[in-house]
Amino acid sequence: MTLHFEFPANLSAEQFIANTAIKQANAQLVSQHYSIRTYYDSFDWRLYSNDITCELNRSKSASSLTLTNLKTGLVIASTELDEVPKFSKQFPPGAVRSTLEPILEIRALLPVCTLTYESYHLNITNKDEKIVVRLLIEEHELLNNRLVLQPVKGYDKAAKHIVEILTTKLGLIPTDKPVLLAALRLQGRRPNEYSSKLNINLDPTMRADIASKYIYSHLLKAIKDNEQGTIADTDSEFLHDFRVAVRRTRSGLSQIKSVLPDNICSSYADFFSWLGQITGPTRDLDVYLLNFEHYKSCLPASIREDLNPLHDFLLAKKKKAHKELATKLQSTKYKTTLSEWEQYLKKPSFKKPIEQNAHLTIKELADKRIWKVFNRVLHEGDAINRESPAEALHTLRKTCKKLRYLMEFFQSLYPEHQIKHLIKNLKGLQEVLGDFQDYAVQEHNLQLFSEEMMTLNTPSNTFLAMGVLIQNLDTHRCSARKDFASKFEDFKQEENQSAFKSLFRNSSLCH
């Protein structure tokens, strides 16, 4: 049974209530009050993507947060609440928190839009004066008015009769579109307008220099989208996505070769390298803080709480690092250079560029570059043995990252299932290389932190706990080092090489 209806544009709530058909149905106005509704979601729309709306409804008499299923319109969970916590883990235990936590994870819950409206609550009773249907009307200033019909168990026939009156006599229109969509439209917005996933649709025949500027413009938008959240430290994912867009841009400037002028590539490669450097310390400390509960869980229960002073140290260090970062992201150097980069990307490309690869189609260049970097991965991986230094694995990790970015830049040029399968295989190799590098860096930095903390009257038990943690990280690092050989063998197996060959080599050999 349809539960949600939209009013005709010329029908007000008062006219609805005064209508003869409604009066004859024994409708009684129970309450009328001014209400404010604020919708919440994460910056990357995780709730909406999971078919959930989160709304805080406030009136003079009550304030409650409700989670609703977008598809069915049914309430998933609700709780009385005056203020919405920033993170799901800050909600009191219950159905709301248990629904939000696995979806939002570490992302902040942010206000998306706010609506003000007059709400009318009506009860429809039978001859015995028992309530058979409840009606909730929302009268909006800028949107068409809405009605929600709430059937009472055991009175399905009465509910169907009211639905017939609403649609045939009053002209209400059944709707399954949430108010949120209409509210966002008023602001010129839409759900899922931001995603951290790289989704660039390229025309295979597009000239390489033009396509590269299109890719960089997409990445620039991601940088700008995450800029303010990074400066405000809204949640750690803003900085993460900011850094990924910066890294991808750097990789593009070095790997999409000879399509833009050398002086442009060199100048902006330096700028994005600087961005990578200034954002690194804050991100590293974010990772340590995000991993902190995991660090504790790896220790014997008897010494877990001894690690807590490390958390305080990391938090203080992170706040200082973030303050320095925020200053740099508001500096003239940052703003001016990013603006100049944006203006360059907007300029029309030369009709006859002189760069060697600028005249190639983007598909030709993609084949050529991916095939070359793939072979470099095989060459560097084959050269690694048990005696190879850690630097060799680090170099291979960076080459794998370049290959991954190239494949993601150009994935729209290839059959979706094939390119995604190859990216998935590459991820397996990247994970073990990333783990090896991360454990080594964490182990080294924890030793440095330990030295810094010696001047801060830190309890000796904390250093003992940190020592055990460092030993654990070293064990994991050694394990990842051992796992590398089998992961690389998986990646270089004949089936995977043939797939790369069939997808990229034949075309690349023609150029």
Image (spheres, rainbow, N blue to C red):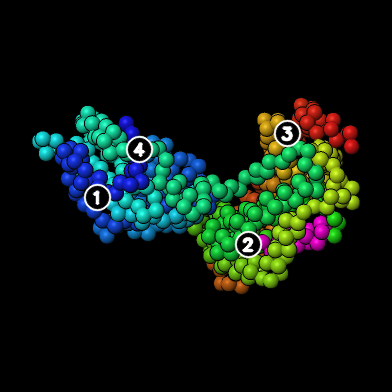
Q: Give the CA separation, mark 3 to mark 4.
A: 44 Å
* Mark found first going from the N terminus, 3 or 2: 2
What kind of residue is marked 1?
A: Glu
- Count neighbours of disc 2 (C-alpha within 10 A) and say few if under 14, some if 14 to 19, many if 20 or more: many
Q: Quadrant of residue 488?
A: top right
> Which image quadrant: the N terminus?
top left
How many discs appear? 4
Callout 2–callout 1 Cβ contact below 8 Å: no
Which residue is label 1 attached to? 14
Magenta stretch holds residue 266 = yes
Q: Nearer the viewer, residue 134 or 409?
A: 134
User: What label does residue 433 carry, if any?
Assistant: none
User: Closer to us: mark 2 or mark 4?
Assistant: 4
Which residue is label 4 attached to? 173
Side of 314 relative to 217 (left or right): left
Callout 1–callout 3 Cβ contact below 8 Å: no
Mark 4, secondary structure of its residue? strand
Q: Position of residue 502 (x, y in %)?
A: 80, 28
Q: Give the CA separation, mark 2 to mark 4.
A: 52 Å
Instruction: Give the residue at x 27% y 32%.
Output: 164
User: Closer to us: mark 3 or mark 4?
Assistant: 4
User: What label does residue 282 carry, if any?
Assistant: 2
Which residue is label 3 attached to? 414
Considering only vertical position in the picture, is 386 above or below 496?
below
Instruction: Give the residue at x 57% y 67%.
Output: 319
Report the span colored magenta: 264-279
Mark 1, secondary structure of its residue? helix
Q: Position of residue 84 (x, y in %)?
A: 40, 57
Side of 323 relative to 184 (left or right): right
